[in-house]
Image (tube, grey):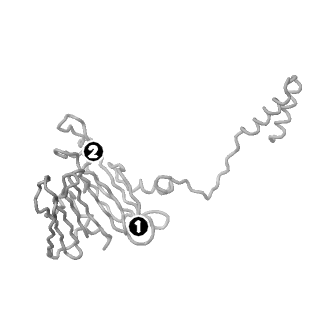
Amino acid sequence: MNKTTVVGLLLTVFMLVGCCDKTWCIGFAADFLVVTPQPMKKNPGSMIIDKGSHISVTGQQQIMGFIPKGYKLFDKVYGDLNKDGLMDCVLIIKATRKDSFVNDRDGHKVDRNRRGIIILFTHGNGYKLALKNESCFSSENEDGGCYDPPELNVSIKDSKLYLHYNYGRYGFWEYCFRYHSSDFMLIGYEKSRNYGAKVFARLSINFLTGIKFVDKNIHGDDYEKETELKRAIYKLPRKPLMRLSKIRDLDEVSFAE
């Protein structure tokens, strides 16, 4: 039975029962016509999109399939990492071991499970594994001493992977990796040692050229005096580039000023 027939029957019923206001009867029938839900037409060729990441639900399911048992997804970032013009995916994963939930020095229960990284290259209609290191990052809930623990931020720029640690008013340090020889090689390192906006020292290393730049405040760590940075340049001995897949603990990868 179509809608026109339904409306006609309604009007007939109202007339038979003696509707006192025919205009109201017609309006009610019109409202019924408007609010009656329409059956949804399914397009078999359409994809459901996650508006936050612009990845199909199928893609999300594929991503979750790469997370090993005993881990959960902590963060994910998209970008081209192998210069093929396709959006690759970096997953930060976190272990879920119950014995890594401990009490901090204030008596609060905190999750000290370590974190890791999985890098996926877009391949055909899905992904393929490019790198996996399940525990190279410390927990976001580590004891930061007199300050909060450093915050890890992952980004992709110009097909390079940046692992940036923000230490608030005390500065930052950052690792730059590039895909080569089926791994991600450490090609750059940056560090800034601060007290608020005042910079005490900066360090920049290019491992491809073997050049290290060190800018130091000539007044040391005296934050009451105006910062005056003096640069020194060093040539580093040639060494094999560090591989992200082989780094056991990124916290141990640091370089002197």
> In screen coordinates, is 93 left or right of 257?
right
Mark 1 vs 2, N-terminal side: 1
Q: Residue at x 19, y 65 (%)?
A: 203
Residue bearing the label numbered 1: 80
Q: Which mark is residue 97?
A: 2
Quarter of the image where the N terminus is located: top right
Query: Relative to the observer, which residue lies in front, 71 or 150?
Result: 150
> In screen coordinates, is 57 left or right of 231?
right
Estimate the spatial distance between the alpha carbons at disc 1 and disc 2, rounded to whole Å.
Answer: 32 Å
The amino acid type of the residue labelled 2 equals Arg
Rendered view: 237 above or below 222: below
Q: Residue at x 32, y 70 (%)?
A: 179
Secondary structure of the residue carrying tag 1 is loop
Question: Disc 1, disc 2: CB below 8 Å?
Answer: no
Q: Position of residue 176 (x, y in %)?
A: 28, 65
The amino acid type of the residue labelled 1 equals Asp
